[in-house]
Image (cartoon, rainbow, N blue to C red):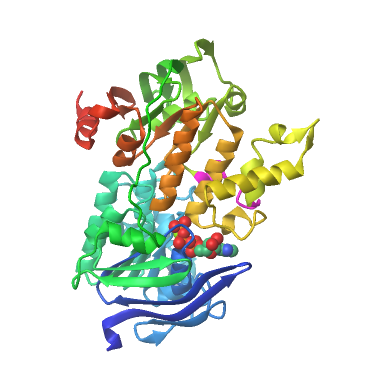
Amino acid sequence: MSDQFILEVKNLTKDFPGVRALDNVDFKVRKGEIHCLVGENGAGKSTLMNVISGVYPKGSYEGVVRFKGQETNYKSTKDSEHDGLAIIHQELTLSPYLSIYENLFLGHMKTRFGLIDWDACLKDSFPLLRKVGLHERPQTIVSKMSVGKQQLVEIARAISQDAELLIFDEPTASLNDEESQKLLSLIREFKKEGITCIMISHKLDEVLSIADSITILRDGQSIVSFDLAEKKVSEQEIIKGMVGRELKNLFPQKEPDVGDVVFEVKDWNVYHPDYHQMKIVDNASFFVRKGEIVSFCGPMGAGRTEMMMSIFGNSYGYGASGEIYLKGKRVSFKNPKDAIEQGLGYVSEDRKTLGLIMIQDVKTNITNSSLPKLSRRGVLDKDLELRKATEYKEALQIKTPSLEQLVRNLSGGNQQKVVLSRCLLADPDIFIVDEPTRGIDVGAKFEIYSILNDMVKQGKSVIVVSSELAEAISMSDRIYVMNEGKIKGVLDRSEATQERIMHMALID
Ligand SMILES: Nc1ncnc2c1ncn2[C@@H]1O[C@H](COP(=O)(O)OP(=O)(O)OP(=O)(O)O)[C@@H](O)[C@H]1O
Ligand SMILES: [Mg+2]
């Protein structure tokens, strides 16, 4: 019976100091299927995949993992790759300053007479790139490409070694709708070729569109598995399994209560940091009122992030020009620190490079932008620091054994909550958040929307850059639509639909 299952996990338990990440988990994957794994932030999804793929070696967990009928004995991912099992991690692991083809063959280069044969590597990279649909020169430096394209390199790398089982840990979290659809099609292609795929995702609509089976993890335990060929399940049923209770609304009610314009940007232009003649933001003007949540939507590469970053103290681009008005007064921000001091807050979309200090603990990461506020006569009030950090840990339900835990040991979604906490504690008047709910589970999304709602109720203003149109429409008072560096138009909440936003982005 068991050759029907390419992967079988039995009674798997994995402990970290102070945390039982996996608690007696059973998990079975049929050969040739697409199996989706869902669960709240910190439920143990990534840990389970890391055990299966040898990131955590045999001996560091209890229980049995069987791949192709054999109990595994992996010491590292090198062993599992050799065995036909490859993982594409939640946080990309490419070397940013190397080229595509160097990344593809790093760690398993072709050699000739004992020397690395780069010509052979280059040659072999073409069919791989074709297969994943990446139209770039193999010599392109990885950091010059979008996240979506980097993801494809990572997948090409995984399939370069004849994988029979591919594991995708939140592959679409950083992709827009179009790129996500492309990636899902690629996974379907793999299935047609007989490759088994496991996919973790918080986007339940895409889970339902692609899965043959679904397994739900909650608090480190396997709760239930569905075989969709036997029985259809609804999004509501999955959510209930994930959070352990009914979740009636996905978005909290927002009472519109907006005042005067408090923040205005006029004729904003920014050029590419390396190619100075290339315009990234083209004469953009917008405003935000007191108590308002305003979203910026548009396709990837529309210039939304670049515009916000350049406004926020020139943290992106070259030759930024334009006017900024804060509460009616013309201002300028020399650098991010200057912007923060004048009342702006910014949460970047890229928590790893711009957001968090991974090797510091949760408490320090939450409080380190607010130290003057937490100090008395220049001395940090440690009790107050602890109280504040605890307050945010509870408000956002950050899952961690203690505030002393290093941030790098938190699950992806919980790291995102730490970034948000830090900015909330700094208490800006104008809060810019770029993809605030990326990698966040449905329940925690609701919490984050509620917190943004509370902020605007207190008279602050929020600017959201969001790739999730449903989120933007439900959350915001107004939506600016951008494409190709230009603001194409603005919609009130009452008139915004996904179709109208997309149409507006594409018309001239
Ligand atoms: N290296 C580690 N050291 C200590 N604790 C860890 C480590 N890795 C994970 N954990 C803890 O194990 C639990 C499960 O984490 P895991 O990353 O598997 O969650 P997840 O389901 O992938 O969540 P997310 O949806 O946020 O990515 C969490 O409580 C996390 O803090
Ligand atoms: Mg994870």
Vertical relation: 196 (above or below) 72: above
**Residue 353 shown in magenta:** yes
Q: Is residue 425 left or right of residue 209?
A: right
Residue drawn at (48%, 69%) of the image:
220
Q: Quadrant of the N terminus?
A: bottom left
Q: In this view, does 430 lie to the left or right of 118?
A: right
Give coordinates of residue 300: x percent, y percent. 33, 38
Give coordinates of residue 304: x percent, y percent. 38, 31
- Quick one: 383 or 314, which is closer to the camera? 383
> Is residue 261 visible to us here?
yes
Residue drawn at (76%, 40%) of the image:
381
Dividing the picture into quadrants, the one containing residue 505 is top left
Give coordinates of residue 140: x percent, y percent. 39, 46
**Residue 388 shown in magenta:** no
- Quick one: 460 or 153, which is closer to the camera? 460
Q: Quadrant of the C terminus?
A: top left
Residue drawn at (36%, 69%) of the image:
161
- Quick one: 439 or 86, which is closer to the camera? 439
Farthest top residue in view: 329
Question: What span is colored magenta in the figure?
Answer: 351-361
Q: How many labels does the image show?
A: 0
Farthest bottom residue in view: 1
Q: In this view, does 377 lie to the left or right of 346?
A: right
Give coordinates of residue 255: x percent, y percent. 38, 30
> Is residue 38 visible to us here?
no
Vertical relation: 75 (above or below) 346: below
Residue drawn at (44%, 35%) of the image:
453
